[in-house]
Image (spheres, grey):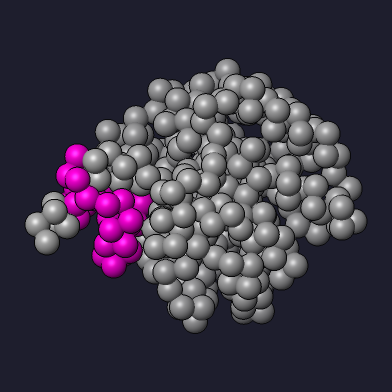
Amino acid sequence: MSQFYDVTLRDGNHALRHTLSPNAVRDYCKIADVSGVWAVEVGHGNGLGASSFLVGKSESSDKDLLEAARDSLKNTKLAIHSIPGFSTIKRDLVPAIEIGVDIFRVATHVTEASTAEKHIEFLSGKGLIVHGVLMMSHMTTVENLLVQASLMKSYGASAVIIMDSAGYFLPEDANLRIRALRETLGIEIGFHAHNNLGMGVANANSAISAGAEIIDGASMGLGAGAGNAQLEAIIANQIRSSHSNLNIETFLSMSEKISQNYPDNLPKITKSSIESGMAGVFSGYAPQVKEIAQEFGVNTSQIWDEMAKRNLVAGQESMIREIAQDLMNL
């Protein structure tokens, strides 16, 4: 049976432009703590230590958000997302350990698992739960995905999570990769879906069918671009198919809190989410793409396609302007 991992208060912070408050975290976590969800991930949209003018300044510090969550979570584990480079061991991971974070996810681009070595080894050496995360997992072959995941396992990760960060997968894509990882690694495998092409819940269900032990979701699907797989819908599907004993009412209460607090930030499938999903580009770029396309008078789909050709990944916002300038000069 899969465990469910709630990313509402981290990936959802993208949709809120990193304005999530400690009080909102505290209130949400009180409900999540009695829901049966395995873990709640909290923080800036790009993870620990990522608050910056480049990818977005957070209105609240990592410390304040994590302490608020820690105050409310007694049964459910507290988790963080950490991208080496944005986060450092001394400045970010050590304080998170001191606050009492239970699960540390160390994330890299799918072809760059080696950049997680020091962080994973440090955390696993302290006996903490540490997961390796491979973002933009559609951007490599299944064979290389296995190589990269095996590296994370060798560093000490007790699980590997693959992220369909661009919402590019169809259900068979998720199923194939989860099966291959489970047959090869011998550790827990997780899946994180995005909904750019409307397949988030279907892909999560497909990953569950393939044996994924950890499934990510967000209340109301709150997340970057078109959002994540909608947590309460995943749970409802599992209850409907007699694969879960969780109580849907608590998850609906979590969903209702998000919809009431952030009615203007709820995800939807838009022109930009479909363009980014088809191009296989991180949808968190959508606001910048729209703004820069208008500024330079170029078509947004052209920008997305060129971003795909240049293999842009999260954190390369500055290149969007360069791409628009190049397109304008064609």
Main secondary-structure element of the magenta-colored stretch:
helix
Outermost residue on the bottom side: it is 143
- For the question of whether residue 317 can be seen, the reply is yes
Quarter of the image holding residue 184? bottom right
- 316 vs 191, left or right, is left
On the image, the x and y values in percent for residue 311 come to: 31, 64
Q: Nearer the viewer, residue 273 or 74?
A: 273
Q: Which residues are magenta?
A: 295-324
* Above or below: residue 257 compared with residue 206: above
- 185 vs 313, left or right, is right
Name the residue rendered at 30%, 34% in the picture.
Answer: 52
* Above or below: residue 175 compared with residue 240: below
Name the residue rendered at 19%, 51% in the picture.
Answer: 324
On the image, the x and y values in percent for residue 241 come to: 87, 58
- For the question of whether residue 61 can be seen, the reply is no
Image quarter in which the N terminus is found: bottom right
Name the residue rendered at 41%, 55% in the picture.
Answer: 276
Name the residue rendered at 27%, 62% in the picture.
Answer: 306
Find out whether residue 121 is within the magenta segment.
no
Q: Nearer the viewer, residue 304 or 99?
A: 304
Find out whether residue 301 is within the magenta segment.
yes
Outermost residue on the left side: it is 329
- 236 vs 38, left or right, is right
